[in-house]
Amino acid sequence: MRALSGFTLVELVVVIALTGIMVAVAAPRFANGDIFETRGDAGLLSSTLRYAQKTAIAQRKSVFVIHNDAVEPNTVSLCFDPNCGGAQVVINPETAGAYVLTFSRSVVVQSSNKGLGFDGLGRAVPNELATYTVTNRNNALQSVGISVEKNTGYVH
């Protein structure tokens, strides 16, 4: 008679327990949500820049993207004047209030042009390349760049 081969119940329990321990230790490293926040905030910033450009074209007047960490940290506001005073704010159609984009705490946004604007034809004001970099505070390797072309105002 031939002997049956296979695993005993004890061996299976030990393997399942070791696999569970390895998953519990390794999973947080792979399931870190920081990259999702970085890319999500970069997507929101890109959409905000495009909305500013479309609003400038629709209203036939300049719209400025104000990114001033000294006044209101980690935010971007849309205004019809470069100083963003009072009644000159762009209205957010979602909230019916002032258009202010607030980034996650785990994200830092740097811009080459703190007072970027779009004229009534959708061109960048001033007429120079503007770049935004959205970087994760916890991992500097996780960063996303956004550019606004100087002659066309194309956001990519």
Image (tube, rainbow, N blue to C red):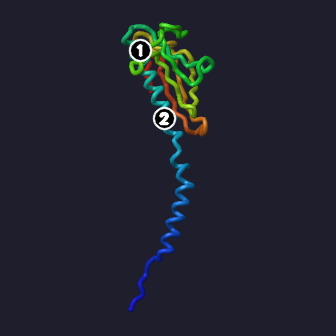
Instruction: Return the x and y of residue 96 as percentages of the image width and height.
Output: 41, 16
Quadrant in which the C terminus is drawn: top left
- The one of 134 and 129 positioned closer to us in this rendering: 134
Q: Which mark is residue 39?
A: 2
Question: Pointer 2 and pointer 1: residues touching (CB < 8 Å)?
Answer: no
Depth check, mark 2 against mark 1: the one in front is 2
Q: Give residue 103's position: percent from left, percent from top.
A: 53, 28
- The answer for how far apart the CA atoms under marks 2 and 1 are is 25 Å
Q: Amino acid at mark 2?
A: Arg
Q: Considering depth in this image, is 121 or 10 the residue closer to the camera?
A: 10
Identify which residue is drawn at 43% across, 14% down: 91
The reply to whether residue 152 is in sight is no
Q: Is 121 above or below relative to 26?
A: above
Disc assigned to residue 122: 1
Q: Quadrant of residue 152?
A: top left
Q: Residues within 10 Å of mark 2 (few under 14, many from 20)?
A: some
The total of numbered circles placed on residues is: 2
Q: Residue 61: x, y in percent?
A: 42, 7
The amino acid pointed to by label 1 is Gly
**SS for callout 2:** helix
The relative height of residue 86 versus residue 95 in the rendered view (above or below) is above
* Label 1 residue SS: loop
Q: Give the mark nearest the N terminus, 2 or 1.
A: 2
Q: Quadrant of residue 4?
A: bottom left
- Tell me what residue is drawn at x 41 percent, y 9 percent: 120
Does 73 appear above or below 107?
above
Q: Residue furthest bottom?
A: 1
